[in-house]
Image (spheres, grey):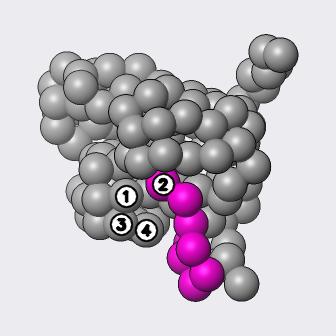
Amino acid sequence: MATYESKLCITVEAGADLSADQFKFVQVASDAQVDVVSSAGGDAIGVLQNDPAAAGRAATVCYAGVTKVIAGATVAAGAKVQSDASGKAIAALTGDVVQGVALKGGDANEVIEVLLVSKHILA
């Protein structure tokens, strides 16, 4: 069954060429631009929706709702997810920061559907 994708997005400046990073978790850098999350469990603000080809270009970031995300490992439907060190979704474990819940699972490098949720620590 297909999921109706309702989402909220913002547009911010890309901090680099993000043309190969569509559907990855991004974070805000100290220069107020967005970059791909670079550490597992990093503090993502959302998921990149487009593919800006240079720093300073408009990056559309989904911060709430249902979005596509590239899986960094096998993720089961219903799993709580966080970002890996490449901005891809992986299963969150106890003590990890949860970014969302997988609505549709998949294997590494497949596009899955995730419901972004308010960030919280998995107990």
At a point 79% along the width and 15% down the height, the residue shown is 2
Q: Are marks 1 and 4 in contact (CB under 8 Å)?
A: no
Q: Disc 1 designates what residue?
A: 84
Q: Are marks 3 and 1 in contact (CB under 8 Å)?
A: yes
Name the N-terminal-most of marks 3 and 2: 3
Q: Are marks 3 and 2 in contact (CB under 8 Å)?
A: yes
Q: CA distance from mark 3 to mark 1?
A: 4 Å
Q: CA distance from mark 1 to mark 2?
A: 6 Å
Identify the secondary structure beneath mark 2: strand
- Answer whether residue 94 is magenta in the image: yes
| x then y, percent, for residue 112 | 57, 31
Q: Disc 2 designates what residue?
A: 90
Question: In this rendering, would 121 be left or right of 52?
Answer: right
Quadrant placement of the N terminus: top right
Q: Are marks 3 and 4 in contact (CB under 8 Å)?
A: yes
Q: Disc 3 designates what residue?
A: 40
Question: In this rendering, would 41 be left or right of 52?
Answer: right
Name the N-terminal-most of marks 4 and 2: 4
Q: Main secondary structure of the magenta part?
A: loop
